[in-house]
Amino acid sequence: MSFIGLTGNMAKIVVTDGMSDDAVSLLEKKGHNVTLKSFTEQELAEGCLSEFDAIIVRSATKITDKVLHSTGDKLRVIGRAGVGVDNIDLKVASESGIIVVNAPLASTQSVVELTISHLLASIRNLPKSDRSLRSGKWEKKQMVGTELSGKSLGLIGFGRIAQGVGMVARSMGMEIHAYDPYLPPKVAKSQNTKLHKDVDSLFRTCTHISVHCNLTDETYHLVNYERMNLMPGKSRLGLKCGNHIVNCARGGIIDEAGLLNALNEGIITSAALDVFEQEPVKPSNELISHPNFHGTPHIGAATIEAQRRVGIDIANNVMRALDGKNVKSTVNSHLL
């Protein structure tokens, strides 16, 4: 799709959720008019995007069917500065001829490191120890944890991030398992990972579960109370290590009500989430006050390095799409 008819190569691009200075400068140096501005849901639905050729969002801005129907004919490219596009109505965007691109490679390392951080914090009771120490207690005996070594890690989804987590976890002595119905078996085999044909088998085998798939109708509440109840609580050598769950992928894949019940009943020993069904999380959410839960406010890609890479990648991808060039990370190419 070409943008012949614009003044030279200049396009009007709005960035609604922030972007690195380097990325903004890149767009401006190429002659584009960049606006940095956040909009309310009402403003978006009332057509505030109708003057722009492209919009770059992160996860905060929701590009719904109402928003897309209000944009008129000018908007041609939506750039998602990150990976997940569940905040964008791909079907309606495609019907309107709007190209949706993302930046899938830029945040991989940051999310891998956060996932491993949550795994380690969980099994060594770091958040609980910190809270105890701050309250003036010295509960050394109560904070005995376990090691990752010798345990089985189940990865739901086996894309770049999951493979990175698997590599680090394997180096720490874990046995790696994965469930990904779309993965060629040879990929898992090449990384010494056991691929399970069904997700229940993964839960029956693994004491540690980490989520790495997209949120779709198929994966919504894939991790539920019934599946958590399948987890063994023991290592393959019979050591009681408990059951642990981490999610740095997308909220909604884990049924939070089911997770809370599993924590209350001792089925799940610890849970760590970076993403939630509703964001921002309400203070009334009982999960965040549970003693065996700890969380972070959707900061998987929130490192200086990742934000710069994400910004540069999405800026380049949006410009290529505006120029009518092929973009490998076009999310909705199959729908256009």
Image (cartoon, rainbow, N blue to C red):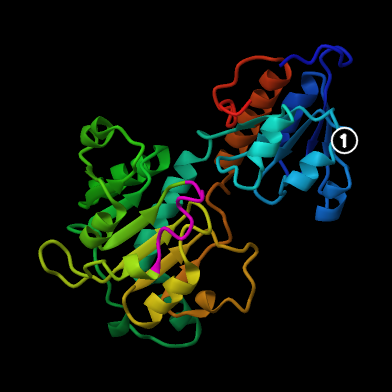
Looking at the rendering, in which quadrant would you find the N terminus?
top right
In terms of image quadrants, where is residue 49? Answer: top right
Q: Residue furthest front?
A: 95
Could you tell whether 117 is left or right of 284 in the image?
left
In terms of image quadrants, where is residue 232? Answer: bottom left
Residue 123, horizontal then vertical, whole percent: 32, 67
Residue 17 showing in the rendered view: no
Q: Circle 1 is placed at which residue position?
A: 50
Residue 304, horizontal then vertical, whole percent: 59, 43
Residue 54, horizontal then vertical, whole percent: 77, 30
Look at 29% across and 68% down and name the residue there.
243
Please state which of residues 243 and 48 is positioned toward the viewer in this rendering: 48
In terms of image quadrants, where is residue 277? Answer: bottom right
Q: Residue furthest left?
A: 237
Based on the picture, tell me whether residue 299 belongs to the magenta stretch: no
Vertical comparison of 156 with 281: above or below = above
Magenta residues (range)? 214-224
Please state which of residues 97 and 127 is positioned toward the viewer in this rendering: 97
Three-letter code for the amino acid on which mark 1 is drawn:
Ser
Residue 141, horizontal then vertical, whole percent: 28, 84
Say what secondary structure mark 1 lies in. loop
Look at 85% across and 32% down and name the residue there.
52
